[in-house]
Image (cartoon, coloured by chain):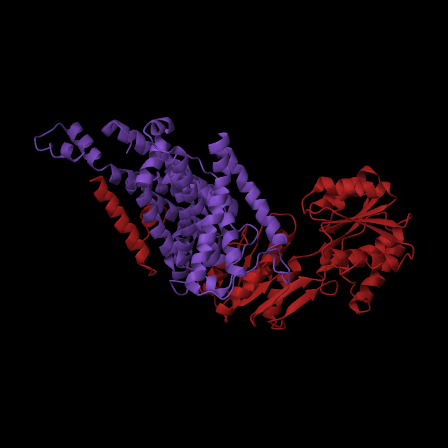
Chain colours: A purple, B red
Amino acid sequence: MSELSTTSNSPLPIKERIILFARNNMGLISTLISILAIGLALLIGGILIAIAGINPWEAITYLIKGSFGNRYGFGETLTRFVPLLFCSLSFAIAHKSGFFNVGAEGQLLMGAVGAVLVGAYIDGLHPVLHVLLCIIAGIIFGAVWAGIAGFLKIFLSSDELINTMMLNYVAILLVDYLIHGPIKPPESYLYVSATILPSAKLPIILSKSPLHLGFIISLLVTAAVFYLIYRTPIGYQMRAVGANRRAASYAGINIVWATIVALITTGGLAGMGGAMELMGTQFKIVNGFSAGYGFDGIGVAVMGRYNPIGILLAALLFAVIRVGMGAMQRGAGVPFPLLNVIQGLIIVFVIASGYLTNKLSETVIGGRA
Amino acid sequence: MKKISLLMMFVLLVSVLAACAPAAEPPVAEEPVAEEPAAEEPVVEEPAVEKPLRVAMIFNTTIKDGGYAQAGYEALMALKEKYNLEVSFQESVGDATVKDVLRSYAADDYDLVYAHELYFTDAVNEVAPEFPDVKFGVTGYMAGSPNVVALDATNWEGVYLAGVVAGMLTETNKIAMVTVSQSPIALKMVNAMYKGALTQNPDVEILHLFTGSFDDVVKAKEMATAAIKDGADIVYGNAGMGTVGAIEAAKENNTFAIGSSVDRNSLAPELVLTSNILDSGRYITIAVEGMINADLEWGQVYVLGVKDGVEFLAPFNNAVPQEVKDAVEQATQDMIDGKVEPPPSDKYMWE
């Protein structure tokens, strides 16, 4: 691309120059289009809010204020960001490796189960060791849960999209069963799991807010995951399998091994997200432990176009929406169903803007950005 | 070039994340909408001459659920009118996020934050010690901090009154009772029904059935139908949505029924004798008025029933004769005078 831009010394017709500018600044342009899309969604949302008889300016002020405008809201936004990021990484890795994992919700729940078993029932460990063991348990449980669908795919060629989706419901009901008996503390009135011990809790990194260490870990994991997929031989093999299974096989890549690594990573990431959510904020499993993080994670990965920066920004946007919506309800009294509409509008607009960017880059550089 | 702009985006992100100060500029703050509508900044309400009490309420379902949450919401709105409160609420809050909502309200200097759900009890007790100047209320069973009040129902007094009605009106001496489970609370209700019926009818028998689900209408209906075939001539349903199924079974077999939670008369006006109502709106009224009149003891659990107006019977239908009404009135009075002992919750009384 850079050798093209250096040839622009001689004067060119205006149309060529625009195309050249666009070609060299696709990243910037796609960002602008995304921001414009969010703005447009909020504009329509604002009109709907006005129709409902509420001052839209006030409502949108609360959206920003609630998610960024104060210390607690800021911390809460970044706390919500953590499980969303893990689930979207999980989906993105699987996607790159040619595996459709829509089961992050179930894997996240199973990861939380693993972490609660280690966190609540193993006593007397050093906090660092205890936290590490909980995270490992979360990864193992998540990976095993994804592994069920993977096993069925590798050995029985059964469709993983359906299996991972169905395993979500199995996980939800299994957790429901567990908190109704096996992991419910006998003295509890309610159907909840045991609470993890203080040594298994992640420390708060921003005082007077719920922001916990899992946030830093999630950023490091993001870097590690993209290092794995783009800078290591196994990452290359995973991507090759994802791009074309048969070609990868002819090239001598061990497809089963690459798929197994992809499965461990995708399930492990979602499971780790569950462990982080448990150890950082909730400390025990309740009914509805995952507020749809696994499903939103798919949206985040698609919106972020499977690229690390894109995923970070998209996860942040989803977190802002989640937290800001609550503030809009509390502060401006925007009715809950209307909030769902606005949330949907933002997501639809941003994903549509992705297609617009693709179309644009096809015309200017003859391929996808 | 593409890499540079990606790098710039990353720098933007990092700077946003790093600057935890309130002044942090989020990327979404750059929306063009910002300039759009008439810009006024009514961030905080004008301070009134006399500062109104600020009350916040949290529901775990929609406020239009036709029962538990709606009653609470309507009570809140009535209180707002009556005492000129400044109110706010958030609905459909999950157990997983309620702590954040509680903290947000408390940090926003609300005087009373009321969580209207049993499953919020632990969260309220966890958050309350962090905000000693804010009062918290919960419809639950525990008040673990001196600024928390927990309001709970007896869950049996209203059933006892329904038992009085059923005991007098049954001709086969068999009453079918459909609940969700055999939990201690359910057993207490069954025993209350038995105890109430026994005061009027020494030969009465209870057929206890449980569905295992709060929303299994079909199973509740099947179970109630079987009990009717077994000779029961009054069906009492207290099984969430299953109550509707129990009443439906009564309707198909032309048998009397008694509803629960809310007035179920509209389901079968000729057959639904009454319903034992649990007015969940009373909780919030008691909490707010207790705060205004300073006669509520914080750090306490209040178990409320007939005396406090939380539990009572819905208006009777035409099939209920005057003598039954008199007996219910007498039983209500006995209960208020403390003459009725709570039933056991560990086994069936007749065993």
Q: Is residue B208 above or below residue A27?
A: below
Residue A99 drawn at (x, y percent): 42, 35
Q: Out of A78 and A257, give the one closest to the viewer.
A: A257
Image quadrant occupied by the N terminus of chain A: top left
The answer to which image quadrant residue A184 occupies is bottom right
Side of B228 relative to A256 (left or right): right
Q: How many numbered callouts?
A: 0
| Residue A28 relative to residue A214: left or right | left
User: Which residue is most to the left?
Assistant: A10
Asked whether residue A144 appears in the rendered view, the answer is yes
Looking at the picture, how far across and down is residue A136, in whole percent? 44, 53
Picture residue at 36% right of the left edge, 50% below the top? A221
- Left or right side of B203 for B22: left
Instruction: Decide which of B262, A85 is in the foreground and name it.
Output: A85
Q: Residue at x 47, y 49 (%)?
A: A140
Compared with A19, A193 (above or below) is below
Asked whether the viewer can see residue A276, the reply is: no
Above or below, A48 relative to A364: below
Q: Position of residue B188 (x, y in %)?
A: 76, 59
Q: Report x, y in % for residue B199.
A: 88, 60
Residue A58 in the figure: left or right of residue B83: left
Question: Residue at 23% across / 42% down in the picture?
Answer: B3
A123 vs B47, nearest the viewer: A123
Q: Quadrant of the C terminus of chain A?
A: top left
